[in-house]
Image (tube, grey):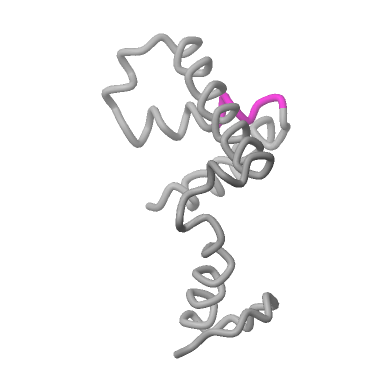
């Protein structure tokens, strides 16, 4: 089962996990199930790690938007890659990015 499907199932099965305040706990739960070695980490510590990862990802995006000189070569390719994938799976995307096929 994919991570997305695991999370969706958790949200269906555990209404408490739908609350924003429980997001970190839900993500930690999925990670613990997916990577059993994480069972050796105290749940509270794993939740702190997950919280840090989520915060770092947010800071990463913010810093790159505010400092274009720090953006990688692939920074502006996401829209096109997403649109190509959506078209591949039969979804009509709304990005209106010209793609050379």
In the rendered image, residue 22 lying in the magenta stretch gets the answer yes
Q: Main secondary structure of the magenta part?
A: helix
Front-lying residue, 42 or 48: 48
Q: Which residue shows up at 26% across the image and 23% down it?
A: 37
What is the span of residues highlighted in magenta in the rendered image?
A: 21-26
From this viewpoint, which residue is outermost toward the front? Answer: 69
> Which quarter shows the C terminus?
bottom left
Residue 81 point in image, percent of width and height? 49, 69
Point 55% across, 35% down: residue: 57
Q: Give percent across and percent down for residue 67.
A: 63, 40
Residue 32 falls left or right of residue 57: left
- Image: 66 above or below 23: below
Q: Residue at x 46, y 58 (%)?
A: 74
Task: Where is residue 22? Give x, y as percent.
Answer: 66, 26
> How many numbered callouts?
0
Position in image of residue 86 (x %, y %): 54, 76
User: Which residue sits at x=50%, y=24%?
Assistant: 50
Q: Residue furthest left?
A: 37
> Is residue 101 found inside the magenta-colored segment of the image?
no
Q: Nearer the viewer, residue 61 or 49?
A: 61
As drawn, the residue found furthest toward the bottom would be 101
Q: Quadrant of residue 64?
A: top right
Q: Nearer the viewer, residue 29 or 67?
A: 67
- Hey, which quadrant is residue 23 in on the image? top right
Front one among 98 and 50: 98
């Amino acid at each position: 089962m994919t991570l997305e499907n695991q999370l969706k199932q958790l949200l269906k099965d555990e209404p408490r996990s739908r609350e924003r305040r429980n997001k970190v706990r839900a993500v930690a739960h999925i990670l613990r199930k997916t990577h059993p070695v994480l069972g050796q980490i105290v749940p509270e510590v794993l939740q702190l790690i997950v919280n840090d990862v989520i915060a770092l990802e947010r800071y990463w995006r913010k810093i790159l938007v505010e400092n274009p000189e720090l953006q990688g070569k692939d920074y502006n390719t996401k829209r096109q890659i997403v649109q190509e994938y959506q078209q591949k799976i039969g979804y009509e995307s709304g990005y209106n990015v010209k793609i050379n096929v």
